[in-house]
Image: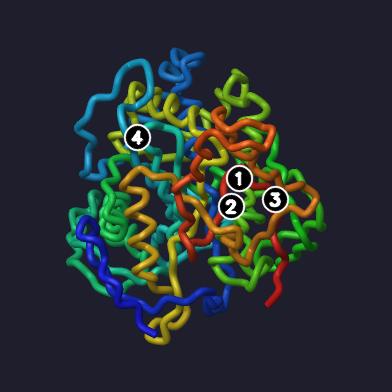
Amino acid sequence: MTDRTPPPPSLPRRRDRRAVTEVPRHGRLKRPSNWRGLAALVGAAVAVVAVSATSIGVITVANLGGRIQDNAVDISNPDESTPPQIGPINGSFNLLVVGVDNDVDQDAAYGERDGVLNDVNILLHVSADHTSATVVSIPRDLITDQPRCTDPTTGTTSPAQSDVAFNSAMGRGGLGCVVNTAEELTGLDIPYAAQMSFNAVVQMTDAVGGVPVCLSDDIKDDYSGLDLKAGTNVISGSTALQFLRTRHGVGNGSDLSRISSQQVYMSSLLRQIKSDDTLMNFSRLYSLANVAATNARLSTSLTSVDTMVSMAQSLRTVNLETMALVQYPVTDDPDFPGKVVPVVSLADELFATIAADRPVVLDDDALGNGSQLNPDVPVEEPAPSVDPAVPTDGSVTGTPTPEPTTSALGGIKGQTAQQETCSVGFNG
């Protein structure tokens, strides 16, 4: 059945694709991938907070600011607004974090590739009132159109292309091309971007003392080298890298299963940071700031200390239960074997919700096939609303409190940062 729903006028029109309720697995690669899907968003967000935290601002600027500025990337999409020197950013903002395969600084242990690919693409949107946020993972193999791009290093211009994999944008024109492609795909303005290197996840997890992840099954993956037992494992260093790389070890072996498994890691890291006062720990803050300076390239719009302080202030007020970690909605298409294509109607609904600054609410069955709810954690039922005008003795003299009007986005896969989930072992 063909999805013919036209996109809303405020969003760019994308090619219609068939809508399905369950996404089939992707075709498998013949050889292991190198760096497929580090949870770069969390690392970048934490690094931004670390670099900008007022408690270490002077030390950070003096010792690390020069390196950050030297590594800055012009994405040809500067933010024209001037954020306040103290206090959160005025309004909503979007940040794209890109993990690059075959980065020039990657260690030889991660192997070599023929070209530079943006294999991790995670978009963060924080609402204007800074009470909710949405984290969208854009699959590397998503078939989409790409705009005309110019490589900032070589000056070579690549013409616009149709029906190409999203992860080819970096090789066509650097970080700016990835940002422009994401803008055309989502209809959102993206003034901030960060490019992460291979070693970032290793050093990030070490800096926060490791990240606890739950596994519903033993996971052994010869491709990534991961070998963990079922239960809760505190992972750091190279083990964290193996966990975030594993595709053959989780769900049905697809990249989409890997994304939902990575959300297990991201949500756990966010809960840990919130619960153990990481952002108040001087030693950890400085370590995270050093990781950012060493392993990240920030857009020129993001290297301003004022901007980073303002962004950090805004992120601190977002509650975990109103932070949705979602997958861009996709399906398979026989015309593009081994790749995925957009489910246009779902994508338009998702990004219309984000553009309107409404929190993304997910169905109860929204988890992808690479994760499941932690069975050892009881699910808390929301407290019933009580209207003070309604007596508790059973008589009715007032008007009942209305139910919330925000409805769930059916068909969108993901979880909230508050949900405690476990990675599911390969079941294909």
Q: Which percent across, then down, holds residue 206?
A: 66, 36
Q: Amino acid at mark 2?
A: Gln
Drawn side of residue 133 relative to residue 191, left or right = right
Disc 2 is placed on an element classified as: helix
From mark 2 to mark 1, how far is it between C-alphas?
6 Å
Q: Which tag, 3 or 4, sits closer to the chain's start?
A: 4
Foreground disc of the pair 3, 4:
4
Provide the residue designation for mark 3.
239
From mark 1 to mark 3, how far is it between C-alphas?
18 Å
Residue pictured at 55% horizontal, 58% vertical:
363
Q: Amino acid at mark 1?
A: Ser
Q: Quadrant of the N terminus?
A: bottom left
Tell me if mark 2 has few (under 14), some (14-19) or many (20+) residues whose alpha carbon lies within 10 angstroms of its own: many
Provide the residue designation for mark 4.
128
Q: Which percent across, then down, holds residue 403?
A: 51, 45
Drawn side of residue 71 relative to residue 135, left or right = left
